[in-house]
Image: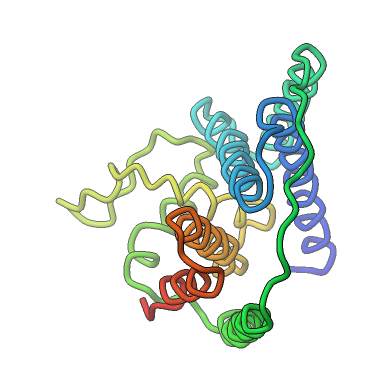
Amino acid sequence: MSFGEYIAGAADLAAVAGLVALATRLVARTLLPHLRGVDRVLALVALFTAGLLACHVIPLCLGVLSRGSVLVAAALLAGGALLLSRRRPRAVVGPRPGGGRAPVATWVLTLYACAVVVAYLSTAVTTAVTQVDFMEFHEPAVASWIQHGSLWPILSLYPGHMSGYYPNNGDVLLLAASLPWRSDFLVRLVDVPYLAALALAVWAIARELGAGRLSGQLYALLLVFLPV
């Protein structure tokens, strides 16, 4: 991959992600103005993921997948969200409740978690993905979608293998990270933001059930850092 190809792919990914992020913000501001804090962050992650999936699955279903068609789909999505925000009045939201000061232990644990993530990424970025399912059908399916531009061909590497009929919704996220460059160098980082979202969700559930702030963070970190 030349430097020019890398820049072109990065610009394409940034444009698609930016348009989907704009649509996400408009929809959340219009339909979910009451959400605050972690709840709002998780809603934004869910909306952004749904928008990113739609921008790739629709061209795939139509058999016209390409960088250009995904960009057009993202632009249409942002335009639809803009129309929605103009036609539907936003709800009136009351003032945000004030929060207490977090204990020092909470911040220490958070900084420790960030250090662990950075240490993990420093090795993951330079390590090839060799997990059997990824090599056997996840990334081959993504390569088939890019090659054919269509969702409909069924990829089976050998007779009797049923993975070609799996829904594999998460593979569309791998596609979003691969299509701009027609390369899989970025797919190893796709899970990272969703692990962070998982930790936030577990923390929010723990707090909703009455757990302390520090206990909620411990539950979240124990789940995210399981060696799987």
191 relative position to 48: left or right: left
Q: Is residue 195 above or below residue 56?
A: below
The outermost residue toward the top is: 87
Residue at position x 65%, y 85% in the image: 108
Residue found at x 38% / y 81%: 227
* 143 relative to 156 in the view: left or right: right
Q: Give the residue at x 46% y 59%.
A: 210
Quarter of the image that includes the C terminus: bottom left
Residue visible at 44% across and 36% down? 151
User: What is the quadrant of residue 54 in the picture?
Assistant: top right
Residue 56 lies, in percent from the top left, at 58, 38
In this view, 139 is above or below 17: below
Residue 183 point in image, percent of width and height: 61, 62
- Colouring convention used in this rendered image of the protein: rainbow
Q: Within the image, what quadrant is residue 24 found in? A: top right
Residue 2 at what x, y percent from top left? Answer: 78, 68
Name the side, left or right, on which 105 lies relative to 201: right
Rendering coords of residue 133 (x, y %): 33, 65
Q: Quadrant of residue 1?
A: bottom right
In this rendered view, identify the residue nearer to me: 118 or 173: 118
**Residue 51 versus residue 156: which sits nearer the camera?**
51
